[in-house]
Amino acid sequence: MLYLLSADIRKAEVAEGWVSAGGVVSVQVLNDAAAVARRKLGMPLHEIRWWLGAVRAACRVVPVTLADHDEALRLGERYALSLYDALIIAAALGAGAALLYTEGLQHGLVIDRRLSVIHPFAS
């Protein structure tokens, strides 16, 4: 989602295409995106609210549940993931997603034979 704000026009356009196509985003990802936009990019909260509102309108937003938390602990242990990454994966699995686009995890990693990690700009 942060690529929507990128100065790299190509990356921003690719990200816009993903969001426009719909998909699933967890509240965890929305919170992290807001924190990065505020802390690292210095965006005012009203702009963050507008930006994330557009993402929320285009994508199905899923909550992070206690079941996701428990699943994240299992995934973290099994795949040697940080709890943060494992929670994103758990929410994606819970939502029935088959693909997870992120630069933060190994491209091609397959979780529980159900979710493939895709590095969005891997060559």
Image: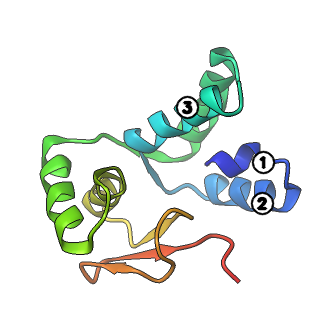
Judged from the image, the secondary structure of the residue bearing numbered disc 3 is: helix
- Mark 1 belongs to which amino acid? Ser
Q: Residue under label 3, please give it.
A: 34
**Relative height, residue 17 to residue 27 (above, below):** below
Residue type at numbered disc 2: Lys
Residue at 44% from the left image edge and 47% from the top image edge: 60
For label 2, the residue is 11
Figure coloring: rainbow
First in sequence: mark 3 vs mark 1 = 1
Question: How far is disc 3 from disc 1 in space, using C-alphas?
Answer: 14 Å
Q: First in sequence: mark 3 or mark 2?
A: 2
Q: For this view, does 19 lie left or right of residue 98?
A: right
Earlier residue among tags 2 and 1:
1
**On screen, residue 50 above or below 23:** above
Residue drawn 58% across the image and 72% down it: 119
Q: Is 116 placed left or right of 87 in the picture?
A: right
Please tell me how crowded label 2 is: few (under 14), some (14-19), or many (20+) other residues with Cα within 10 Å: some
Does the CB distance between marks 2 and 1 fall below 8 Å?
Answer: yes
Determine whether, in the image, residue 44 is placed left or right of residue 9: left
Q: Residue at x 66, y 32 (%)?
A: 51
**Distance of mark 2 from mark 1, alpha carbons?**
7 Å
Q: Amino acid at mark 3?
A: Ala
User: Would you place residue 98 above or below residue 23 in this image?
Assistant: below
- Could you say which quadrant of the image residue 34 lies in? top right
Q: Percent x, y for residue 115?
A: 35, 74
Residue with the mark numbered 1 = 6
Q: Whole-percent x and y of residue 45? A: 62, 17
Between residues 59 and 11, which one lies in front from this camera angle?
A: 11
Q: Residue 63 — which label?
A: none
Picture quadrant where residue 74 is located: bottom left
